[in-house]
Image (cartoon, grey):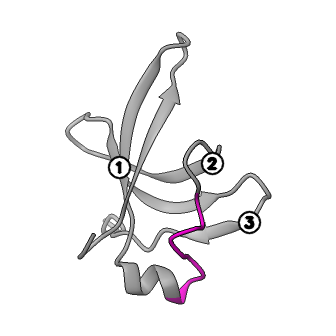
Amino acid sequence: MNPHAWIHLDVENDKGEIEQWSFELGSPNGLTRRGWSRATIKVGEEIYVSGYLARDGSQRGNVRSVTLANGQQLDGMSSRPKSK
């Protein structure tokens, strides 16, 4: 959905429990220019998300990159924290 896309994940924590996480990506148009499509990630596919956790401690974050099961890495185009 505009203006940003989201990935919703079921993530196994250190205790073996499943937690629901949400990660914000960039705009759909920007993602398309970087090689994303609606079919890039399929439901149930295992992926690795690198990004920045929400400051409020919630199970949310901004995506820096996503690595697919085949090793392909894609830019998440989300907002980046400002350098200090």
Q: In the image, residue 26 lies at what x, y percent?
A: 37, 73
Q: How many marks?
A: 3
The residue carrying mark 1 is 61
Verify whether residue 36 appears in magenta: yes
Which residue lies at the image location 69% right of the left edge and 57% below the top edge?
68
In the image: residue 77, left or right of residue 68: left
Q: Which mark identifies residue 30?
A: none
Per the model, the C-alpha gap separating discs 2 and 1 is 15 Å
Identify the element where label 2 is drawn: loop
| Secondary structure mainly formed by the magenta segment | loop
The residue carrying mark 2 is 47
Viewport quadrant of the C terminus = bottom left
Verify whether residue 29 appears in magenta: no
Q: Quadrant of residue 41?
A: bottom right
Identify the element where label 3 is drawn: loop
Q: Check the image and name the residue furthest to the right.
A: 70
- Which segment did they paint magenta? 33-41
Q: In the image, residue 73 lies at what x, y percent?
A: 68, 66
Which residue lies at the image location 39% right of the left edge and 65% below the top edge?
25
Against 22, is 41 above or below?
Answer: below
Against 3, is 55 above or below?
Answer: above
The residue carrying mark 3 is 72
Q: Amino acid at mark 3?
A: Gln
Closer to the N terminus: mark 3 or mark 1? Answer: 1
